[in-house]
Image (cartoon, grey):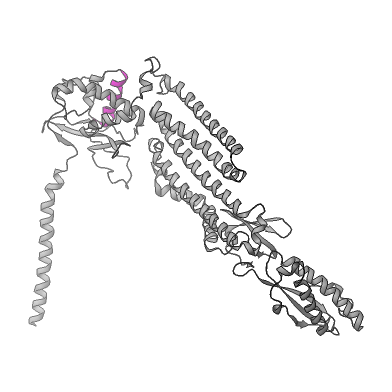
Amino acid sequence: MTALKFFRASIGAIFVSVFVCFALLAVTSAPTWAQDDPFYDIDGLNPGLGAVPDSIDRSTPRSAMESFLRAADEEDWAAAAHLLDLGALSSADQARDGATLAQKLHMIVERRALLDWSLLVDRPDGLDARASDQDTMGGQPRRSLLLRELALDPVPATLRLNRVRPGGDGTELVWVFPRATVDEIEPLFDRYGPSPFEQMLPSALRAEAVGGLMIWELIGLPLLITLACLAGWLAAFGFRLGRQWLHHASHKLLDAARLPAIIAAVTAVLSWGTQEVFVFSSVLSVFISPLVAVGYTTAALMLVMNGLGAILERLLGPEAADLTHREVAEAREAATRVAALRHILTVLVFVIGAGIVLSSASIFRSFGLSLLASAGALTLIIGFAARQVLGNIMASLQIALNQSARVGDRIMWQDRLCYVEKINFTYILLRNWDDTRVVVPVSEFVTETFDNWTLEDPGIKRILKLKLSPEADVAALREAFNDIMDDMKAGELGSELGDLEEATVNVAGQDALGVDVWFAVPCLDPSTQWEVSCEARERLIKAASQIAEQTGRAVFPEGAALDAAA
């Protein structure tokens, strides 16, 4: 009884302790939550700039950006400077450098930051009432909005709008570009500002034309494209000269690298021109950057596929049928490994290139397609649309890696005697004995059963099945068959015959027509077994006819000549 009371008292003490802990946690956490105000407190805001003009409205994120862009259009940089937090500068420096910093910031925004106006809501608290439930900041006041992240060494720079309260309680809350963004203006301008070539252009060419583009951009873009095409032509001309100067053995590799080199040359000129000579506005750069990434990715993909394809052709030799011979078993394995490497590298280059393209394609965010560009949604869409293709690609990798069927292997596929000519991404190309091609989808190839005559040992036994009369002298035929094997071993086909001890004659069955006799011909190479077996069959039938004439006993059943040869 005393133990029961002690247990109850202990449980009660535990519950009381837990309740007290939660109460203390709630009390101590309350001030922390209260301190998370939807704005930043700063000492003051640009005292060196004087009074804020009436044209500047900093009450909401949208009005602040509109005021900044409107002042920039009117080239009123002194007014635009009121949208920057210049607290890192002295009052005298604010009056002197504020307008210049505002002008440089506008040029950065114009050239590299394609604005997402759906983010810039027209509410003082920056709350986005249209945000989904999945958005962690949905339905909450904002004190900082990320406009764009720009590449900069050693870490990316961010363009933000912050809601600040200058001077403490009672002062108006306003939206401005924060000090962190202002500090990044100079390095960003050095990277994304006008190039030395552009600065040398007359002011008339730097005037705005149509669609937010300047006159020099409308002239410079066609010139840059022409220069890129010229670079591609020069690359092609260089490869033509290389074919004349280099040895014939190098022509395949030159042909494989020719088109990737042309694409890379065109892309390199576009990349160099848009980064060093012409720094285009965001309207063009949002398309040019992904195109450059696509160009490099395409060149790399084609180089991998064409280059390894050329290596495969060298391994296959002038005639692909050569790989079916037993002497080139190592070449078969090497060709299959190269095919697997080609598939793996192609997939890797494609995946990495697609990631680079998507990461550089700011257009997805800019045009409200962030959901489509997100990794999860994009993976689902691509996976659903190309599930069969992706399945075939993985199956081809499986075949190439486990080498259940190698390039050059002799196989029996659905009663067709073929050999594997190519292992592609989505299909297997089989070459039939009559030189016709059989195209088999990879997904079907990995699920069907087939005979591989060269997987482990190329040596096979070719069985000649003959239907003989019950009165036939099988012993005489066995002796004749052994003589035929000895004669063939000493002839031209002797190198294709295996161990003659494996040459056997067996009575495998009988029926009303006669007996089934199987003659086993040992062959070393599946690629020549057909020729060897046909020669042996022809000699065997001739010997059987001679035995029938000598003994007067029929060898084949009467009236069943069609059943005599199996």
Give the quadrant of the N terminus: bottom left
Please, which residue is most extreme toward the left here?
2
Judged left or right of residue 262, residue 511 is right
Judged left or right of residue 211, residue 560 is right
- Which of these two is toward me, 489 or 456? 489
Residue positioned 69% across, 75% down in the render: 499
x and y, in percent, of residue 191 in the image? 32, 30
x and y, in percent, of residue 153 in the image? 30, 37
Residue 54 lies in quadrant: top left
Q: How many marks?
A: 0
Residue 305 drawn in magenta: no
Residue positioned 60% across, 63% down in the render: 329
Give the quadrant of the C terminus: bottom right
> Which range of residues does the magenta coloring cover?
59-75
Residue 207 lies in quadrant: top left
x and y, in percent, of residue 447 in the image? 58, 64
Q: Height in image: 379 above or below 458?
A: above
Residue 202 lies in quadrant: top left
- Which of these two is toward me, 81 or 397? 397
Judged left or right of residue 254, residue 75 is left
Q: Height in image: 330 above or below 272?
A: below
- Which of these two is toward me, 514 or 254? 254
**Residue 130 visible at all:** yes
x and y, in percent, of residue 217 in the image? 43, 23
Q: Height in image: 467 above or below 350?
A: below
**Residue 177 visible at all:** no
Residue positioned 27% across, 37% down in the render: 145
Q: Main secondary structure of the magenta part?
A: helix
Residue 64 drawn in magenta: yes
